[in-house]
Image (cartoon, rainbow, N blue to C red):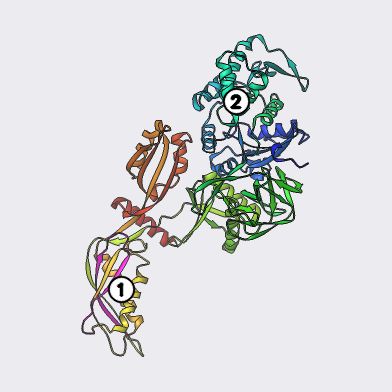
């Protein structure tokens, strides 16, 4: 593939709801541009961008994949992205590095949940968007209805640039509204034709809307339009181009990716209207604030790593977008985040899994390089003289969790190594070792996300693991006060053992953990044995008297005791302290504590009632609601962690996939008595089974 200058590059993310046909559309554009010789099928597992074994098995896109095509002396770097929420991180990273988005919509289903989500994400970057109304040839396809839905959801700037010719049974071409020409598909080729009479009125009406928007982009054109003068074809095209680039026009094109109808016209529009890479880039200043810096070929080399992948043949692969300057193969670059110098080997352009060698990557280009040692997703690569760190990528915090255990204890190291590799690849994946429950927890964007991680562990590292429900880190404490004695006395043959303490146990406020008070007078317990008493209590607190959970928030006051000049020892006093602890906990009204989390749920207003009604069923307390001004509400509540397992799936079900939530630890609270009884019984049953 030849080298292209910055102005001849286009970077476009293909986004949309899962199942809307993004991968098939990508495949069709690859075919009609000549990049591939035959169109693969998702059902057969033969598409260019869905090449991963899990993608083929599940017939969904999991990984964002590059699909560069050459068209009209330009290279368009398409990124085919997942449509399912579990893999939203791939969409976020791709939108960070492109200049435009191609929103694929199904003409049968219209605007779906995923369409709404990706549209909002594109809004955050103020990206130009073109809508491709796909599957016009499908049964029950309805262009007018789907167009009306898009205008209702996304505003009056959504205007058709194409109209379909024929019905779902006989879809045969499109009308180009700007040119007022028809393109009819016949005998594997497109032929220019007259606009059908039945579509002329609609075409002229929409063309007038396009001209009006085009005129608004330039003061001279506005004046000319208001004075009733007719705009030239060149002026209209320029106005449309400027309106699109400014995200003030969201044109709707249509066609069938399977039949190839509308694909050449879509590519024509993307080359014509999509902005070339910008001459400014987002960076971070010394105080961490986002700033704009000059970009382009004349500036020092800067690139943002937006994706990391583990390739079975070449190892770790880093995908990057060049924002200024250029990078050549077999050179060096500095990781601006870490200050480490990286050796850059052969630069690559990926098309699916296929690698195309590059001699250099210029400003605006997207490329990849293997085996960078110190560089991860979100890092900035640059020249030595470059002091600016490009703005990274904000990924959502994963909330869905499972405990992971290897089926064979011998595989524990392999599991750790595998999970560490996935952490490099996937910023929406998290691993945590819970010291209290002694479980390894994995966090992801949903159950499917974590199932894919487990599947890849087996395939790439030969490790089979089980996913189980995470244990809740309960704790125990006391509500009352008890004064008890602990005496350890043992005489067997030689030297005996003797330790005797009297301790008062009292509750402390939540979060105080433990306080030891020494009130010994007159040497009842020698000074050298008092640290042993404290140590014995701390060790004993690791296991509570109710269900074996750690004990917290107690004060132990050593008030009296006795010793033997020969038989007393540190060990004897440690044992005496632990005996006093067990007796004192039983007498001081022991209770069970559970972790309470602050939960924030963001949902459209029409689902607010469902969420509010669900919270009490989870023993949650709603603390407040905040309207966001965009038709959504944030509901704040405090909910026991034990009731939040599986909430990611439940929330999607309640809100048709439109809800989002986050949570963080707040404090511990007493477990209601009837629930505590069940927890204690289950724990005792589990302990006896072991």
The reply to whether dot 1 and dot 2 touch (C-beta < 8 Å) is no
Which residue is identified by label 2?
251
Quarter of the N terminus within the rendering:
top right
Residue 394 visible, this angle? no
Query: Which disc, if any, is residue 579?
Result: 1
Residue 490 included in the magenta stretch of the image = no
Residues packed near mark 1 inside 10 Å, few (<14), some (14 to 19) or many (20 plus): many
Q: CA distance from mark 1 to mark 2?
A: 78 Å
- Of labels 1 and 2, the one closer to you: 2
* Element type where label 1 sits in the image: helix
Q: Residue at x 52, y 45 (%)?
A: 447
Query: Which disc, if any, is residue 52?
Result: none
Q: Is residue 657 left or right of residue 267?
A: left
Residue 519 included in the magenta stretch of the image = yes
Range of the magenta residues? Answer: 497-523
Residue 420 horizontal/vertical position (percent): 58, 57
Residue 152 horizontal/vertical position (percent): 49, 24
Q: Is residue 686 left or right of residue 478?
A: right
- Between 74 and 473, the one lying in front of the other is 74
The quadrant in which residue 253 appears is top right
Q: Is residue 355 above or below residue 608?
A: below
Q: Earlier in the sequence, mark 1 or mark 2?
A: 2
Quarter of the C terminus within the rendering:
bottom left
């Amino acid at each position: 593939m030849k080298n292209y200058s910055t102005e001849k590059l286009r970077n476009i993310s293909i986004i949309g709801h899962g199942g809307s046909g993004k991968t098939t559309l990508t495949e069709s554009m690859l075919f009609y541009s000549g990049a591939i010789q035959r169109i693969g099928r998702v059902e057969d597992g033969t598409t260019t961008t869905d090449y991963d074994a899990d993608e083929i098995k599940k017939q969904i896109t999991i990984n964002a994949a590059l699909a560069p095509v050459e068209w009209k002396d330009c290279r368009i770097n398409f990124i085919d992205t997942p449509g399912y929420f579990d893999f939203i991180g791939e969409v976020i990273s791709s939108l960070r590095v492109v200049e435009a988005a191609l929103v694929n919509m199904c003409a049968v289903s219209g605007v779906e949940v995923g369409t709404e989500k990706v549209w909002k994400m594109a809004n955050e970057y103020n990206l130009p968007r073109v809508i491709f109304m796909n599957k016009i040839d499908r049964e029950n396809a309805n262009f007018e209805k789907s167009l009306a839905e898009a205008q209702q959801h996304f505003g009056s700037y959504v205007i058709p640039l194409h109209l379909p010719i024929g019905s779902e049974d006989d879809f045969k071409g499109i009308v180009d509204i700007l040119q007022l020409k028809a393109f009819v598909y016949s005998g594997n080729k497109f032929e220019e034709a007259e606009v059908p009479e039945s579509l002329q009125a609609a075409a002229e009406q929409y063309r007038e809307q396009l001209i009006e928007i085009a005129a608004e982009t330039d003061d001279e054109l506005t004046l000319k339009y208001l004075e009733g003068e007719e705009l030239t074809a060149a002026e209209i095209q320029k106005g449309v181009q400027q309106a699109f680039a400014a995200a003030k026009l969201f044109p709707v094109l249509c066609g069938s990716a399977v039949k190839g109808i509308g694909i050449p016209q879509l590519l024509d529009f993307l080359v014509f209207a999509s902005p070339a890479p910008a001459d400014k880039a987002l960076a971070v200043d010394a105080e961490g604030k986002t700033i704009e810096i000059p970009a382009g070929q004349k500036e020092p080399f800067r690139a943002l790593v937006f994706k990391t992948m583990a390739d079975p043949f070449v190892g770790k692969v880093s995908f990057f977008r060049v924002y200024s300057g250029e990078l050549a193969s077999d050179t060096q670059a500095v990781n601006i985040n870490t200050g480490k110098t990286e050796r850059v080997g052969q630069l690559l352009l990926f098309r699916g899994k296929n690698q195309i060698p590059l001699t250099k990557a210029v400003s605006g280009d997207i490329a990849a390089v293997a085996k960078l040692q110190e560089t991860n997703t979100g890092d900035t690569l640059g020249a030595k003289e470059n002091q600016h760190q490009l703005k990274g990528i904000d990924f959502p915090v994963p909330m869905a969790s499972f405990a992971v255990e290897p089926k064979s204890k011998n595989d524990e190291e392999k599991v750790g190594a595998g999970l560490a590799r996935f952490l490099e690849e996937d910023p929406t994946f998290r691993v945590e070792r819970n010291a209290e429950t002694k479980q390894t927890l994995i966090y992801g964007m949903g159950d499917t996300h974590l199932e894919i991680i487990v599947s890849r562990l087996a395939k790439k590292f030969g490790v089979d693991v089980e996913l189980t429900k995470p244990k809740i880190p309960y704790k125990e404490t006391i509500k009352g006060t008890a004064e008890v004695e602990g005496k350890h006395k043992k005489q067997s043959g030689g030297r005996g053992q003797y330790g005797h303490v009297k301790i008062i146990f009292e509750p402390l406020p939540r979060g105080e953990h433990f306080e030891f008070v020494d009130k010994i007078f007159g040497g009842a317990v020698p000074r050298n044995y008092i640290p042993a008493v404290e140590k014995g209590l701390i060790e004993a607190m690791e296991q509570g008297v109710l269900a074996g959970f750690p004990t917290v928030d107690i004060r132990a006051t050593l008030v009296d005791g006795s010793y033997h000049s020969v038989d007393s020892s540190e060990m004897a006093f440690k044992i005496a302290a632990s005996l006093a602890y067990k007796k004192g906990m039983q007498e001081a009204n022991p209770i069970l504590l559970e972790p309470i989390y602050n939960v924030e749920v963001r949902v459209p207003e029409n689902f607010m009632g469902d969420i509010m009604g669900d919270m009490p069923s989870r023993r949650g307390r709603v603390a407040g609601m905040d309207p966001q001004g965009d038709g959504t509400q944030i509901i704040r509540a405090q909910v026991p962690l034990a009731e939040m397992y599986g909430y990611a799936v439940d929330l999607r079900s309640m809100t048709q996939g439109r809800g989002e939530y986050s949570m963080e630890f707040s404090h511990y609270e007493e477990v209601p008595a009837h629930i505590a009884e069940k927890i204690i019984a289950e724990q005792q049953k589990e302990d006896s089974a072991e």
